[in-house]
Amino acid sequence: MEHRLFEANPDPKKPKFFLTAAFPYPNGPVHMGHARTYTIPDVLARFKRMQGYNVLFPMGFHYTGTPIIAIADAIARGEKSWINLFVNVFGVPKEELEKFKEPLYMARYFHEVSKISMIDAGYSIDWRREFATIDPQFSKFIHWQFQKLKEKGFIVQGTHPVGWCPRDKMPVSMHDTKDDVEPEIGEFVLLYFKDKDGVIYPAATLRPETVFGAINVWVNPNATYVKAKVDNEIWVISEDTAYRLTFQLRKVEVIEKFKGEKLLGLRLRNPVTGEYVPVLPATFVDPKMGTGIVMSVPAHAPYDYAALMGLKPSDLSKYNVKPEELKPRPLIKVKGYSDIPAKDVIEKLEVKSQEDREKLDEATKEVYGAEFKYGVMRDDIIQYVAKDIPEPARSYIIGFVKSWIVGKPVSEARENIAKWLEASGLASRMYEIVNKPVYCRCGAEVVVKILEDQWFIDYGIEEWKQLAREALKQMRIVPEEYRSNFEYTIEWIKRRACARTRGLGTKLPWVDGWIIESLSDSTIYMAYYTIAHKIKEYKLKPEQLTYEFWNYVMLGEGDVNKVSKKTGIPVKILEELRNEFDYWYPLDSRHSGKDLIPNHLTFFIYNHVAIFPREKWPRQIVVNGWITVGGQKMSKSLGNILPILFVNRKYSPDVVRLSLMITAEVGQDGDFNEELARSVLDHLKRIYDFTQKVKDMICYEKPGKLEDIDIWILNRMQKHIVKVTESLENVRLREAANTIFYIIYDDIKKYMDRVKYHLNIPERRKTIGWVIGKIVNTWIRMMAPYTPHLAEELWQIIGGKGFVSIAPWPKVEEEYLSPEVEVKEEYIERVIHDIDEIIKVIKKKPSKVYIYVAPIEMYEPLQQAIKFVEESKPLKDFIRFMVSTAKDKRRAAEQAKKIYSLALDIPPHIRDILKQVKIDELKALTSALDYIKGKIGVQEIHVYSSIDKKAPDPGKRKHLALPFRPAIYVE
Ligand SMILES: [Zn+2]
């Protein structure tokens, strides 16, 4: 920090890289979920910085909206669960907690705690640019953004359904609800079933096209229902519905309350068939969903079918229902199903009763999905229409059904019948939270309210959608499989309430009484970072930050002299700000958790294309998965929200960083647990101890001659540099971490194992010291993005210059690339492996080992065989080829078989090298003899050429030697 390594300023000589992560709400300390989202960009920031980029990674704090106020209110109300969490889990001192009733005090407190946590975690943030969304200067920026949106016609005022908290009396979306659930709003059609007196029983359905087969009506006998005056009609609905309807522009006056069982046996007239159908009991009917009145279509609704199965003959006679009345009516043809699809699926899933909720939900999903996609309305439904309705009404209805329903796909028929019934006064609509129950942070259950005069951002405008699609198309999405989630969101997203009547934040600039909500004031704030520090440095006042000011700084529009005159900001400063923005923008990478795809990240795309020219559109979005703790989702109720600071203090920041990166690849869900942290800690300790152990050997004088094994480790390091660089470029952070911390460690361990026999030879010791110095220097630089604290310490230990955090990223040194040495080392390991296998078979401790290697000339037939194998030519072709030039045809054929199968056996990457390289096996094994002896635990090992006539051959194995596979005899 004190060295200001991470403060980035425009530098035209350097390429820039600007990345941001979603800023936190300071209503608690940043926790492990944040840690994952921030460690990912920090690793990339550090990597890019070492690659020579001018990297900007800033951070701010999101005070906007209700997340802070709701919790301050809960503390003020004395809610135990929050107080426990703050005191026992977050470690807030009791005397501080008292002051949390004041929302801003609490926000400032957690703002500071979170900032300390992030510094402690080693995030390479430029803190000069920090800001809070309630800063008056930031509000001026949001004013400018909203004026721009309004000018373009993207902000509209109107009547629209929204998720609503009846206690707070305001719209709620994801960040206002418990557990961050976005309330999803669906639309029910209410079909008016009527009794003999004309009282309406509005059956709520998503499938009005099945009304032809509605042979009875369900109510829940145990729920409370009311008779109520709704607008100017008399309705019978559940008591809860009467409450919810009041939010949807309906006037509701309850006349009478009673239990649902009172309605059983009543007869109601189906609005389309005209038949009087019975009201029957069903426990699956939820009085809090829809109206509490459900029409029963057993042929196409698994719940209805299951509920009818459960009725006993005694029930039927009790309600005066004849069994034949309840026969399911087939309405829809759908391929792959019988006339009664509900029955098919119920039998397939072995549903036993209407209480089998899980299976019934699955069955419903299947039938509804199949019928919506492939279903067509049957011709014979006409027989049910207007059965008991007199002419001429009857002919009129039949005419409609014939032309608009029969033979139509389900999706069309559904809309047609709903519109027609509505127009005929036989139906209306009602909104519902379809993923209910959703709770506001204050604890009240969210309902749908039809809001009048509400301000909306209209993400449904087609030209705007089109620009968003284009931006998405040219953007890199990591991981790529999340792209379809963005595409889907852009397609369905419509109007969104953008202002609230309470909460912290910026007022709508053109009208009083509205505050811009948190998912609407956080869409282009990345641009604000580019100049946030300058606004502070030059003490610019909010009133100076006019519409013209932002137009100039963010868009380069207007005459700088006029802007200067109007704002009182010197031209030089205006130009400096413009330059900052222009240098850093567009944003190179945006980071957030996957839960923000359907809202924040999509709004981010939309608002950028609305405000900025194409060349300033964002370039990349990186989406990360969840993090669980010990296998559990973090939640307030479990009390397992782990603040970063505590975890860092317990394990050290580097352990936490590496654990989070190694647990899963970026887009996947990961788990942080004790066992993982312990094993990472132990491993980092091994790396530290190793560096301590070798530091005195390190030698900077370049040696004259390198042995094969020296070149082997240098060659391996070059390959790792290529692979790790590629992994990091592609944001495969787990893969890169695995190579750096584990694979390279194993390679270095092997190298040390190979050369320990040379350490008492002074000349070799010096060379090895030089090799170690070189590879450790490269290695520490590769660790630095992940474990910066450890890397700086190791860098000091080996006498590295300056800070490793700004040392150059390792580059491949071509001179150390040696496929030949790599293949030689592979050969030695294979020989050791083969000897081990033989020893296992003979099951005794050997005293002597004889190795016979093939002469180098035999590599020619092997190389030929490799060619045959690679061209997928069969063995017989190779035999023919070998025999054609041989004197002893039979022997040549036999030899060809062996060599061909050897070529098949060699892994492709080695084959590739062997095509051009021949190994002097005698030399290779002799030079590694100490190592081989040590590995096998046998002191007497003899290596001979297989054509050495004088070589002893006690096991008669000499003649079996093949290239790359010597003959071995163990005594
Ligand atoms: Zn509320």
Image (cartoon, helix red, strand yellow):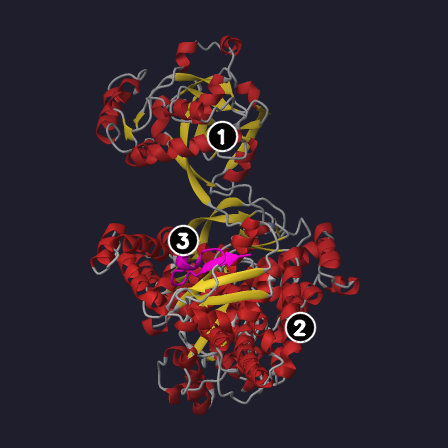
In terms of depth relative to the viewer, which is nearer, 496 or 334? 334
Q: Magenta stretch: residue 602 in it? A: no
Looking at the magenta stretch, what is its main secondary structure?
loop
Image: 426 above or below 934: above
Q: Amino acid at mark 1?
A: Lys
Q: Amino acid at mark 3?
A: Asn
Residue for badge 2: 689
Residue at position x 44%, y 83% from top?
580
In the rendered structure, which segment of residues is drawn in magenta?
954-971
Residue for badge 1: 359
- Asked if labels 3 and 1 touch by Cβ distance under 8 angstroms, the answer is no
Spatial distance from mark 1 to mark 3, Cα to Cα?
27 Å
Can residue 737 be seen in the rendering of this structure? no
In terms of depth relative to the viewer, which is nearer, 450 or 690? 690
Q: Magenta stretch: residue 965 in it? A: yes
In the image, taking residue 833 as reference, residue 492 lies left or right, namely left
Residue for badge 3: 485
Secondary structure beneath label 2: helix
Tag 3 or tag 1, which sits nearer the N-term? 1
* Mark 1 neighbour class, 10 Å CA radius: few under 14, some 14 to 19, many 20 or more: many
Secondary structure beneath label 1: helix
Spatial distance from mark 1 to mark 2, Cα to Cα?
57 Å
Q: Which mark is residue 350?
A: none
